[in-house]
Image (spheres, rainbow, N blue to C red):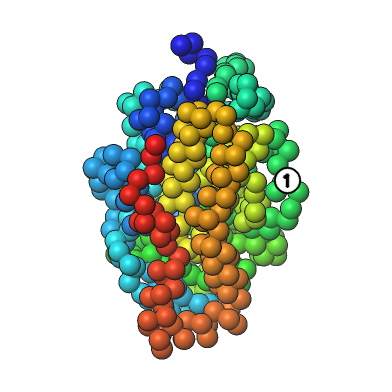
Amino acid sequence: MSATFFDVAIVGGGLAGSSAALILAAAGYHVGLFEAKCYPHHKVCGEFLSSECIHLFNQLGVTSHIQALCPISIRTVQITAPNGTTWTNLLPSEAWGLSRYALDKLLADHARQQGVVVYENSTVTNVSGRLSAKFCLEIRSASHLSTFQARAVIAAHGKRSNLDRALNRSFLNKSQPFMGLKNHFHGPPLGDQIRLFVFPGGYCGMSEVEGGLANVCLLVRQEVFRQAGGTIEQFIAWMCQQNPLLGQWLSQATPVHDRWLSIGQVPFIRKNLVENDILMAGDAAGLITPIAGDGMVMALHGGMLAATYVDKMLRQPTLAKSLLKDYAQDWRRQFADQMRLARALQSIMLHPSLLTPGLHFLNKFPVMGELLVRYTRDSHVLKQKRVSP
């Protein structure tokens, strides 16, 4: 088979893309994985791996490799309101803290070992074609432009990219008022805790990753960011004033990187799951608000789900059109309830007048807090024995 033709081309080498590639390679397909950047690299991400992620890692056969990276054990969650009101609760089971810098490279390397052809520094600028014929992918690298062909395509390119514009995706026309920032810090130990500090218009999460570094990742309304001065330095200073306990921790911490990573127009809105016969996966399919701590498991699970449907379509091409509809329905069945709950929780988080009495309520009735934590989990992962073909 020509090196320029694949059974399946996957756009994006993050969690969704790599998990899909691993599933399809294991099923015997010739898979090309196209990543816009070079491994390893940092991403705006809370880097929180819930216990459901560990279950999926077992299915992908990478758990022991990930354990060798020494992820940090996370067992409790704590939320702090601007006035200092705090609620703490045990997680249902152990979670891990591990940087995307380490994790994404590990998964891509494992995909290579399983026969996936991984292209780095390769940006997919356009995809044309249909399942009934073949797809053509236009790729831009540092040195040249090239073209690849594939029988099927999974788009796992992240929250938003030039490919979304090339496909004329409708979500780009809707309001997307949030932005995200992330850095790593040397600071006071966080132990086995993930902490969320709320401030007007946003919240900041922190937990440890491998090596004892603290991941500090925050979400804020872009309007609030501008009103706080419009620069990252001015905003961070303002944020620390709004939540003194957060400011106290940051005053004792030193950033690892000179510059914060940032992303604008974060799209917590409904997206089409299929575009021109291309299956969307990971954040390209839909983005859950970070308060739920489910972003990484949704990416892994969603990538594996997309791979399952691509396998079905390639094995039963006469059913491809109906399977595309089934994929969209299945994706929403698996994730829609979690996403609605996470949006509701974020709405409360962004209104201190609701958050403070809410935290008092959870402290008074601990069982409600335990139920709340459980309802945010991706229960579908644990109900199914196998996601792969």
The residue that mark 1 highlights is 170
Relative placement, left or right, of 240 versus 77 is: right
Query: In the image, is residue 253 above or below residue 54?
Result: below
State which quarter of the image contains the C terminus.
top left
User: Can you give x and y, in whole percent of width and height, for residue 225 in the image?
Assistant: 65, 61
Can residue 136 be seen at all in this image of the molecule?
no
Q: What residue type is labelled 1?
A: Ser
Relative placement, left or right, of 79 versus 222 is: left
Instruction: Determine crowd level at label 1: few under 14, some 14-19, many 20+ residues with C-alpha closer than 10 A.
Output: few
Check the image and name the residue furthest to the bottom.
364
Can residue 201 be seen at all in this image of the molecule?
yes
Judge by depth and name the residue closer to the eye, 193 or 165: 165
Query: In the image, is residue 221 above or below residue 18?
Result: below
Q: Residue at x 67, y 34 (%)?
A: 276
Q: Residue at x 32, y 26 (%)?
A: 113
User: Can you give x and y, in whole percent of width and height, for residue 69 in the image?
Assistant: 27, 44
Query: In the image, is residue 307 above or below residue 355?
Result: above
User: Can you give x and y, in whole percent of width and height, for residue 178 in the image?
Assistant: 64, 58
Q: Which residue is drawn at 33% across and 27% down?
A: 114
Judge by depth and name the residue closer to the eye, 382 or 49: 382
Check the image and name the residue furthest to the right.
173
Check the image and name the residue furthest to the front.
318
Q: What element carries label 1?
A: helix
User: Can you give x and y, in whole percent of width and height, for residue 134 in the image?
Assistant: 61, 21
Q: How many labels does the image show?
A: 1
Q: Which residue is drawn at 49% across and 55% down?
A: 334
